[in-house]
Image (tube, rainbow, N blue to C red):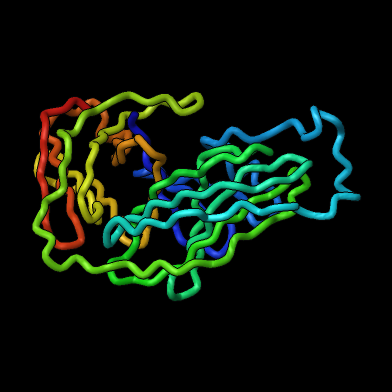
Amino acid sequence: MRKRLFFLTALLAAPLILVAAGCRDTGVNPSSGTAESFYAKGGKGGGGGGGGGGKINCKSDKGMEQPMEIQTIDIESAMRVHLLSGGGYDRNFVKPAWYEIMDENGNVTYVPSGLYTGDVQELLNIYVEGFRPNGTYSVRLVSQDYCANPGYSPWQTLAMPGVAGDVAAPVATAPVAKTRAVFIATFRVVEVEATDNTGVSKVEFFFNGQPVHTLDLVDNLQFWLDGEVPLYEWYVPSEMRGQSGLVTVRTHDPAGNVTETSANLYL
């Protein structure tokens, strides 16, 4: 399964979800108690309540009974971390959960779990990439009950390794161009799948040898779920649509290894 990659900028409030060539403003800080808006893209949240659908009186609710916990942290490389979380219970239903990742300067990135958590224990299995090699981060999981009472797991430290000795170049597909409909608008998008043993640090797009778009991915966290493949995109500007030419994509890793793929495409 392929995944259109989301890029999450590190903000203290009102996080942005960036989609390759543009940005989508969620308009909400998930810690403000309105997580359902934060999960409008990709989550399964919304509606309903616990106790077989009975009405919930939030005024008498005493808070979340058992917050979800991070169960496994696997630092796979200098840029990538695998997070596995679960547990959590509340008689009034559990809303979507999200990770908070804080860098050394105190900037927090909100990473959606991509899963909806009910009053049964589910595992949140997510990969996060874009960490700075040799950087130090902290991570915790935030979950909510139906009345928006938050529960927090303890902060845990991520000490990222370096990239010494990495000589393996990224693996990337040839670029392809597609038409994508977003609400009432249609766009032309050039996309490429790419992976690296350490992590993809930058993706550059060229048209007939001229640079047209760059994705800088260090300290710009991206995420995907288990079994999905990272996908990097360039939304073609309107003035370039209808042109034909050579599209070249250079995929970098943080050790300086580069892979170049290309294809003749109609934009």
Q: Residue at x 22, y 56 (%)?
A: 198
Residue located at (52% from left, 47% from top): 112
User: Residue 19, relative to residue 153: is it above or below?
Assistant: above
Residue 234 position within the rendered picture, expressed as x and y whole percent measured from the top left: 29, 40
- Residue 42 in the figure: left or right of residue 195: right
Say left or right for 115 vs 151. left
Residue 108 spot, x, y in % from top left: 51, 64
Position in image of residue 134 (x %, y %): 29, 71
- With 102 as the anchor, is 135 left or right in this view? left
Residue at 56%, 50% (x, y): give it: 98
The image quadrant where one finds the N terminus is: top left
Residue at image coords 11%, 29% = 264
Residue 78 vs 82, above or below: the answer is below
Image quadrant in which you'd find residue 131: bottom left
| Callout count | 0
Q: Residue furthest bottom?
A: 105
Q: Quadrant of residue 164?
A: bottom left
- The location of residue 192, given as percent across then percent down, is 23, 36
Identify which residue, 252 or 87, lies in the foreground: 87
Compared to residue 60, the image places residue 225 above or below, namely: above
- Determine whether, in the image, residue 230 is placed left or right of residue 108: left
